[in-house]
Amino acid sequence: MTPEQLAQIHSAAFTLERGWTAAEFTDLIASAYVNLFTADGGFALTRTVAGESELLTLAVHPDHQRRGIALGLLSDWIAAIQPHVETAFLEVAADNHRALALYQSAAFTRSGQRKAYYARNGAPAVDAVLMSRAFP
Ligand SMILES: CC(C)(COP(=O)(O)OP(=O)(O)OC[C@H]1O[C@@H](n2cnc3c(N)ncnc32)[C@H](O)[C@@H]1OP(=O)(O)O)[C@@H](O)C(=O)NCCC(=O)NCCS
């Protein structure tokens, strides 16, 4: 998947937040410890370092949503990191109910909250919910 395709999916999926540009994806993919997982119409970008793995972003194009693609991407990520890390974590906007449901179904639990973390055009900023999953 090219940086342009990643940017296109990201902008189509994130309607309330700024879409990341192809140049930003180019830089991120070239960064140390960053991994890209792709599927038809969706992708996940992660960073794994020092026994922890973070989900940097996850997006599925609206034309491909609700077909289990995000759950599959999360499974690919977990399968890749599970032997090597103690914890996986992510941040999600408190008003993103579908993503919260997705992460709960992938066994992530709430571990914290950041106040007014996500800016919203013409509306108050929204808290970030921190979620994590530990591996024994
Ligand atoms: C959140 C997102 C990644 C889900 O992608 P998806 O491929 O449609 O998700 P899946 O089909 O794998 O859904 C898995 C589970 O997540 C939950 N879920 C996903 N979409 C949902 C929705 N619209 N409403 C309620 N629950 C939803 C459900 O529990 C679902 O299981 P079910 O279909 O058996 O009920 C996608 O909607 C998206 O790209 N949204 C915009 C970007 C975003 O919010 N990314 C995450 C930011 S942290």
Image: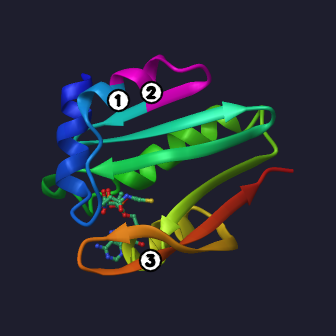
Type of amino acid at the residue the image marks with label 1: Phe
Quarter holding the N terminus?
A: top left
Q: Is residue 71 above or below residue 43?
A: below
| Residue found at the very far left of the displayed protein | 63
Residue drawn at 50 percent across, 48 percent down: 74
Q: Read off the magenta span.
A: 26-36
Q: Residues within 10 Å of mark 2 (few under 14, many from 20)?
A: some
Amino acid residing under circle 2: Leu
Q: How is the image coloured?
A: rainbow
> Is residue 30 part of the magenta span, yes or no?
yes
Label 2 with label 3: CB-CB less than 8 Å: no
Image coords of residue 82 (percent x, y)? 72, 39
Q: Residue at x 59, y 56 (%)?
A: 90
Q: Residue at x 39, y 74 (%)?
A: 96
Of 122 and 78, the residue lying toward us: 122
Hey, which quadrant is residue 43 in on the image? top left
Write down the residue under mark 3: 126
Taking depth in this image into account, of 135 and 95 the one nearest to the observer is: 95
Q: For ligand 1, tell me if the residue under mark 2 lies within 8 Å.
A: no
